[in-house]
C-alpha cells in the first residue's frame, strides 16, 4: 500500500488489453462517520459493519475513544465539524484543532449556531476558524435556528445529529439554496435508522427531543470512490468492470455519477453484487449542476478534458473551502492538457478541452485526495505522473493497488 509520506510521486502506465476486474470499493466514509457519531450519542452499543478504512473514519473512531484534552481532527472536514457539535452538546471540555489547512477552513456558521443553542465555545486564533476551545453546554439556549445552507451541508448534518439531545429538540430553518441536499437526507435517514424521527418540510427541519436507540448498520460502498472507475471505463478502449457493494437505492448523493456518466460514455447495470460498467458513446457537450454532488466535479472536469468534451457546470460554491481551493487547482492542472476552465458568468464554469500535445502528463495534488484520483485515469491516454500520491489514504487507501490489479503499471518514486 502506498502510504509513505516520503513518496514524492507515482508514474502510471495503462494496461495494453481490456480493462477488466471486480473491485471491492472502500466503504462510504460519509455513512460511516455519521453512524459513528450517532452511535456515540446513543450511549449504547451498536453493531456497525463495513466501517470505512479511509483515514477520516479511522481517525474519528480513535478520537471518539480518546480522553485527551487536545483533539486533532487533522485534515478531515467531517471529523472537525461533527466533533464540534458532538463535544459542544455533550458538554465535553476539549480543544479541537487540525492541520494548517483545516485551521483555514471556516467553521463560524456552525459555532455560532451551537452558541445560540447553549454551547460555550471560544476561538483560540482567528475568529471563525479552528482551533476551538469547548467549554461546556448550558442547555438553556434557543430551539429555533436559522442557518445558511449554501456553504456546507456538514454544518447542517452536525446540528441535526445532536438535535434529539437538546432539551426542547431543534427546529432548523435553512436559508438560501440548499447545497448537497442528499447528504442532509442521508443524515436524517441514518437518524431514523437509530430510532429518531424528524420532519423535513420545504426549508425547515424539525427534530423533537428524543433518545437514539442501539441498532445494527452495514455501511454501503462509496459512490465517490466509484466515480474514478467510471472515468477509467470512459477512457478505456475496452472495459468490463464490476464494482462491489453498491446499492441501486442509496443514501449517497454521489450516486448521481450513474446519470452523469451515462452521458459521458458509461452504461451502468445494477447486479446482485453491485454495478457492472460497460462502454457506450459519449456526448460531445454536456452541462451539470453539482449542487447535490460537489465531490464529483473534479472527476468530471478531468475526464471531459481527456475525452475532449465541453462541459458547463454550476453548483461549485463549496469547492473553494475543501481540502484545497478545488476550482483554482483544477484551473491550473487542466492547462497541461491545453484545456481551460473559466467562470463565464457568476457561478457558471465552462471547461473548453484542448488537444493533448505532451507524451507524458504530470499533475499536482494540493494535499487533496480527489485531485490525485480524478487525474489518474488519464494514464489511459498518456503516461501520468501523480505527485504526493499518499493523499489517497484520506478516503481510498487501496486506490493504487486496485489500479495495479486491473493491469496498470505503477512506478514509485521516493
Image (tube, rainbow, N blue to C red):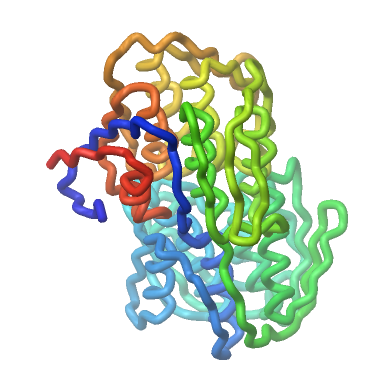
Q: Residue 299 at what x, y percent from top left?
A: 50, 35
- Residue lying farthest to the front in this orientation: 17
Q: Nearer the viewer, residue 145 or 10?
A: 10
Q: Residue 62 at what x, y percent from top left?
A: 37, 75
Q: Residue 168 at what x, y percent from top left?
A: 76, 79
Location of residue 245 by image quarter: bottom right
Give the number of marks. 0
Q: Residue at x 61, y 29 (%)?
A: 265
Q: Nearer the viewer, residue 167 or 135?
A: 167
Location of residue 186 by image quarter: bottom right
Q: Residue at x 72, y 58 (%)?
A: 249
Quarter of the rendering occupied by the N terminus: bottom left
Left or right: 22 with respect to 63?
Answer: right
- Residue lying farthest to the right in this orientation: 201
Residue 150 seen in the current view: no
Q: Residue at x 65, y 50 (%)?
A: 253
Q: Nearer the viewer, residue 200 or 352?
A: 352
Q: Residue 123 at what x, y percent from top left?
A: 44, 59
Quarter of the rendering occupied by the C terminus: top left
Residue 379 seen in the current view: yes
Vertical relation: 11 (above or below) 133: above
- Residue lying farthest to the bottom in this orientation: 44
Left or right: 35 with respect to 365?
Answer: right
Vertical relation: 137 (above or below) 324: below
Q: Nearer the viewer, residue 322 or 170?
A: 322
Q: Residue at x 58, y 42 (%)?
A: 277
Vertical relation: 64 (above or below) 314: below
Location of residue 165 by image quarter: bottom right
Left or right: 288 with respect to 326?
Answer: right
Amino acid at each position: 500500500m502506498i502510504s509513505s509520506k516520503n513518496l514524492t510521486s507515482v508514474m502510471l502506465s495503462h494496461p495494453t488489453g481490456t480493462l477488466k476486474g471486480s473491485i471491492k470499493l472502500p466503504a462510504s466514509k460519509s455513512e460511516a462517520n455519521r453512524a459513528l457519531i450517532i452511535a456515540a450519542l446513543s450511549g449504547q452499543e451498536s453493531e456497525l459493519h463495513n466501517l470505512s478504512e479511509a483515514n477520516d473514519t479511522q481517525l474519528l473512531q480513535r478520537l471518539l475513544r480518546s480522553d485527551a484534552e487536545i483533539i486533532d481532527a487533522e485534515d478531515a472536514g467531517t471529523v472537525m465539524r461533527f466533533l464540534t457539535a458532538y463535544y459542544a452538546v455533550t458538554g465535553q471540555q476539549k480543544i479541537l484543532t487540525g492541520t494548517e489547512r483545516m485551521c483555514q477552513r471556516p467553521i463560524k456558521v456552525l459555532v455560532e449556531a451551537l452558541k445560540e443553542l447553549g454551547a460555550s465555545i471560544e476561538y483560540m486564533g482567528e475568529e471563525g476558524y479552528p482551533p476551538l476551545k469547548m467549554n461546556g453546554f448550558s442547555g438553556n439556549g434557543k430551539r429555533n435556528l436559522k442557518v445558511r445552507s449554501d456553504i456546507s451541508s456538514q454544518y447542517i448534518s452536525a446540528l441535526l445529529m445532536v438535535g434529539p439531545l437538546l432539551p426542547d429538540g431543534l427546529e432548523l430553518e435553512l436559508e438560501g439554496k440548499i447545497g448537497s441536499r442528499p447528504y442532509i437526507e442521508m443524515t436524517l435517514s441514518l437518524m431514523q435508522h437509530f430510532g429518531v424521527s424528524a420532519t423535513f418540510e420545504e426549508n425547515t427541519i424539525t427534530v423533537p427531543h428524543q433518545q437514539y436507540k442501539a441498532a445494527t448498520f452495514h455501511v454501503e460502498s462509496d459512490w465517490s470512490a466509484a466515480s474514478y472507475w467510471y472515468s477509467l471505463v470512459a477512457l478505456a478502449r475496452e472495459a468490463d468492470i464490476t464494482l462491489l457493494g453498491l446499492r441501486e437505492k442509496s443514501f449517497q448523493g454521489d450516486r448521481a455519477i450513474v446519470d452523469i456518466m451515462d452521458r459521458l460514455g458509461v452504461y451502468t447495470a445494477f447486479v446482485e453484487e453491485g454495478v457492472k460498467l460497460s462502454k457506450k458513446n459519449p456526448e460531445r457537450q454536456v452541462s451539470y449542476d453539482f449542487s447535490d454532488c460537489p465531490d464529483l466535479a473534479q472527476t468530471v472536469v478531468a475526464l471531459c478534458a481527456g475525452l475532449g468534451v465541453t462541459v458547463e457546470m454550476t453548483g461549485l460554491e463549496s469547492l473553494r473551502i475543501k481540502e484545497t481551493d478545488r476550482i483554482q487547482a483544477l484551473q491550473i492542472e487542466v492547462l497541461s492538457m491545453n484545456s481551460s476552465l473559466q467562470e463565464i458568468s457568476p457561478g457558471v464554469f465552462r471547461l473548453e478541452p484542448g488537444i493533448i500535445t505532451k507524451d507524458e502528463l504530470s499533475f499536482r495534488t494540493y494535499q487533496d485526495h480527489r485531485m490525485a484520483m480524478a487525474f489518474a485515469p488519464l494514464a489511459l491516454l498518456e503516461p501520468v505522473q501523480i505527485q504526493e500520491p499518499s493523499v489517497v489514504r484520506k478516503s481510498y487507501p487501496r486506490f493504487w493497488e486496485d489500479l495495479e490489479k486491473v493491469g496498470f503499471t505503477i512506478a514509485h518514486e521516493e
